[in-house]
Image (tube, rainbow, N blue to C red):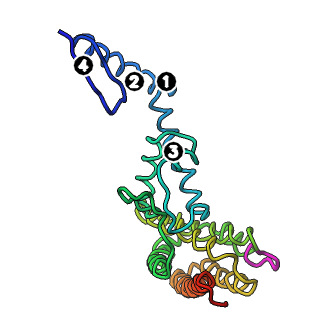
Amino acid sequence: MYTLVYFCPMKWIFRGSVLDFANAVVYNKASNLQGFISGKGPSMAARNLKQQAYNVIKEKIINCEFAPGAVYNEEYLCEEVNTSRTPVRDALGRLEQEGLIKIMPKRGIVVSPLTLKDVRMVYEMRLLLEPYSLRQYGDALGEPEILRYCQLFSLPDISGRQFFQADDDFHMWIMEATDNLYLKQNYELLYNQNRRFRILTGTLSARRVRETCGEHVRILTACLKKDWENAALAMEDHLHRSREGTLELLLARQREEAGFPR
């Protein structure tokens, strides 16, 4: 007796006896297991493709190469990543969980927009997490790093990419001190959105850069004294000012796109 078996998840069709089919399955499982153990099998390659697709699409979203609110289809994304649908779909599932996209059945993949409400929500969470981290985990911040950041933000000519990288590293360094995986995971989502705000709204004015550096130094000065309450209060003040600056820049961009003068 012969049978026709369709095994969709593995994308292959088998014709032959039931015994032959069973033997083939056992052989296939053993081969995959051996490949996994050696680190050279299809399982490892599949994981690498999924991670590559995730990294490429995520970076394009964060850098606003995939514009907020834009709609894409799977075919286009497969071409961009130069891979098949399976790794792309896996990546899209992860990115939707992170709030960077929305998968709309029969419509496509929508890149999450950046609105004034998004700015307020992100900063609401940052105001909860970053001052809390200083109050609860400040003792984990090393003095050499505190002094290094003090020196960096005191440079008279810090600007552009150097400033933005230092700013990102500074806030991430504070959150990395927390001995709480869930806080870190939630902050990473905010970090990604904050980078999108920055790229979308453009560079800060020289005045705002100087002000931000001063706010950072005030936070760090309190950290040197191990005065975590005042460090947290200085962080709250900094985040309030940063939120207002981001809202102003985003509102100005929206007005410009609508045809109104700045």
Residue type highlighted by circle 4: Leu
Q: Which mark is residue 4?
A: 4
Asked if the residue at tag 3 contacts the one at tag 1, i.e. Cβ–Cβ closer than 8 Å, the answer is no
> What is the distance, in whole Å, between disc 4 and disc 2 at their CAs?
26 Å
Q: Taking 152 as reference, is 221 left or right?
A: left
> What is the distance, in whole Å, between disc 2 and disc 1 at their CAs?
9 Å
The N terminus is located in which quarter? Answer: top left
Secondary structure category for the residue under label 2 = helix
| Residue range of the region highlighted in magenta in the rendering | 152-159
Query: Residue 256 magenta-drawn?
Result: no
Is residue 160 or residue 237 the one in the foreground?
A: 160
| Quadrant in the rendering for residue 151 | bottom right
The C terminus is located in which quarter? Answer: bottom right
> What is the distance, in whole Å, between disc 4 and disc 1 at their CAs?
33 Å
Query: Residue 155 magenta-drawn?
Result: yes
Residue 228's place in the image compared with 61, above or below, is below
Asked if the residue at tag 3 contacts the one at tag 4, i.e. Cβ–Cβ closer than 8 Å, the answer is no
Please name the residue that numbered disc 1 is placed on. 38
Residue at left 77%, top 75%?
Answer: 159
Asked if the residue at tag 1 contacts the one at tag 2, i.e. Cβ–Cβ closer than 8 Å, the answer is no
Residue 185 image position (x, y, % from top left): 45, 61
* Mark closest to the chain's N terminus, 1 or 3: 1
* Mark closest to the chain's N terminus, 4 or 1: 4
Crowding around mark 1 (Cα neighbors within 10 Å: few <14, some 14 to 19, many 20+) is few
Q: Which mark is residue 33?
A: 2
Please name the residue that numbered disc 3 is placed on. 51
Residue type highlighted by circle 2: Leu
Secondary structure category for the residue under label 3 = helix
Q: Taking 116 as reference, is 214 left or right?
A: right
Residue type highlighted by circle 1: Ser
